[in-house]
Amino acid sequence: MKETLLEVKQFKFSFDTYAGEVQAVRNISFHVKEGETLAIVGESGSGKSVAVQNVMKLIPSPPGRIIQGQIIYQGEDITHYTDRQMEQLRGKELSMIFQDPMTSLNPTMKIGDQIIEGIRNHEPIPRADAVKKAIKLLTEVGIPDPKDSLSRYPHTFSGGMRQRVMIAIALACNPKILIADEPTTALDVTTQTQILELMNDLKEKHGTSIVMITHDLGVVAKMADRIAVMYAGKIVETGTVEEIFYQPKHPYTWGLLQSIPKVSSKRMGKLETIPGTPPDLIAPPKGCGFASRCKFCMNICKEVEPESVSISASQSAKCWLLDERAPRVEREHEEVKKYS
Amino acid sequence: MSVIRFIVKRFIISIVTIFLLVTLSFFLLRTLPGNPFQTETLLTVEMQEKMMSYYGLDKPLFEQYLTYMQNLLQGDLGYSIKYRNRTVNEIIATSFPVSADLGLRALAVALPIGLFLGVLSARKRGKLTDYLCVLLSVIGVSIPSFILGSFLQYIFALKLQILPMAQWQTEWHTILPTIALALSLLAILTRVMRASMLEVMSQDYVKTAKAKGLSEGKIVRRHQIRNASIPILTMLGPMVTSVLMGTFVVEKIFALPGLGQHFINSITGLDYTVTLGLTVFFGIFMVFANFLVDIAYGIVDPRIRLMK
């Protein structure tokens, strides 16, 4: 049994704005085990970035504010760690790569310095050794001419190459968890595949756990061991890849799966969408957040929030349809198998 | 592209710029109505004409222009029309050091303090420190230097009697004019640096630096200040030039023998050679300052280096 590295429990996080308190994350719990990849999926504004950036406390406070909950890393509650304590964890235990490689590297600093800076921040080794390590890292992430690349500036690299540099920076101190916040969204499709393969390779090699945030279910299928589906600041369904792709239980998950563009369909139909927009998180609905967009919405859905229902040891969903008193509804069946 | 090619290219462009500047100023100046001797009411029209021919001002304009350019190439800016027996070169040589001295002192005060307050203010955004810095820079920008200068004189020279009222003699004499000149510079620098820092602080690479586990201090020093100072560099060329060239108001209030007064007096008195000479001097200085700024740009920001 693999050990649980990171656990987030009943976590609530809000932003104080002039318009009011935006409840970006409303009571979520998830965990990451050693060496596994957890994918957090959901549409824009569902709170997935906020949820994971909080693990590293990268969201400035104010305006951000932890309302309740715990973040536990290797058995230790880091929820209220000070900045100084967090600095020990950031880059060394937990690392992060971001969505846009074009802006995530400092344009006025050589990439070698940007890598070495991270290494020497955590390991008191001479510069020459750090340089060697940086070269090794660049080789590992597939940058050609790693030695010469050290003295190059970010603008001389393409987006894909910059993301590789970002990965090198993130892996510099062998972190246990790599948080990837939509790492391939800003890249073109062929580069996406390369970056994902690189991440998978490195994960195998170093045993790093990955928390992958994405709204691309193709990425999820390729990378994840487990999936958490987020909607309006909550995790509405969670389970293994197989469970989510083959036996999804939540209507929102159904909608997400149906919205995948299908190359294989014979008729070039319209792209499937989920009608409507996510609820306003300043005044979230009291019932299920998805109720207003759900085809199967019942009276209770608008009034009372559904509890999490376990479907198997690894899968659970929050939906009133899973209640034994609810009518049996069938998911409009699609050829799910084709794209997994 | 090699550095030498860049410098040569910039040098040629600078020469052309200065040539255009001199030519334009020469002809524009002559379109002003009247002549240098008109203002002296005692002179008859006949005598005025005599004076004009004495200075060669009655010749065809283009001929005068050629003569001027010839002399200019030899570094000779000509005789002043108003000051008897003084060349423009002499006027610059005696007045510029005073203005430059004052200007450098003001910059030496304003630059470090302004940048520091800008960084501080951005880091403490929305807190009391920030408001105080913003208040100071609003005050600095809005109070005209003649008010500030007179105010300083009133407090420190007249009431407290701890500093001399005016003139340029000992170190003590430099304090009040330096403050009077530095405050507005400091205010502008603070504002620009604050805005620039705020922009840099929200950049993704700052988040990357934080995710590496760097401390706040290291992030500010290594990633923010350098990038935030690029807009400061841009404004430094014109700012340094105008400050070193002397400020009419401050020099007038403190009775300093600087260059500022000559700019104003020579234009009101239609002292063609002085106006033109100072314009050329100013122009060369400005072009040179901007040249230095461009080189500094390349050092600070590698993206700009590539584009040259």
Image (spheres, coloured by chain):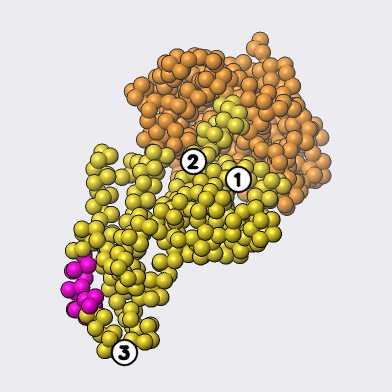
**Magenta residue check for B58:** yes
Q: Residues within 10 Å of mark 1 (few under 14, many from 20)?
A: many
**Magenta residue check for A71:** no
Q: Mark 2 points at which residue?
A: B227
Residue B223 pos. (x, y %):
52, 35
Q: What stretch is highlighted in magenta?
A: B54-69
Chain A display color = orange
Q: Which residue is drawn at 53% across and 48% down?
A: B171
Mark pair 3, 2: CA separation: 64 Å
Q: The yellow chain is which one?
A: B
* Residue B203 sits above or below residue A312 on the image: below
Q: Residues within 10 Å of mark 2 (few under 14, many from 20)?
A: many
Q: Residues within 10 Å of mark 3 (few under 14, many from 20)?
A: few
Query: CB atoms at circles 3 and 2 under 8 Å apart?
Result: no
Q: Could you tell me which secondary element the residue under label 2 belongs to?
A: helix
Is residue B29 toward the left or the right of residue A285 in the image? Answer: left
A188 and B134: which one is in front? B134
Task: Identify the subunit bearing mark 2.
Answer: B
| Amino acid type of the residue that numbered disc 2 sits on in the rendered structure | Asn
| Amino acid type of the residue that numbered disc 1 sits on in the rendered structure | Leu
Q: Which mark is in front, 3 or 2? A: 3
Q: In which quarter of the image is the C terminus of chain B?
A: top left
Q: Which residue is drawn at 25% across and 85% down?
A: B49
Corner quadrant of residue B18: bottom left
Mark pair 1, 3: CA separation: 60 Å
Q: Mark 1 points at which residue?
A: B117
Query: Same chain for marks 1 and 3?
Result: yes
Q: Could you tell me which secondary element the residue under label 3 belongs to?
A: loop
Mark pair 2, 1: CA separation: 16 Å
| Amino acid type of the residue that numbered disc 3 sits on in the rendered structure | Thr
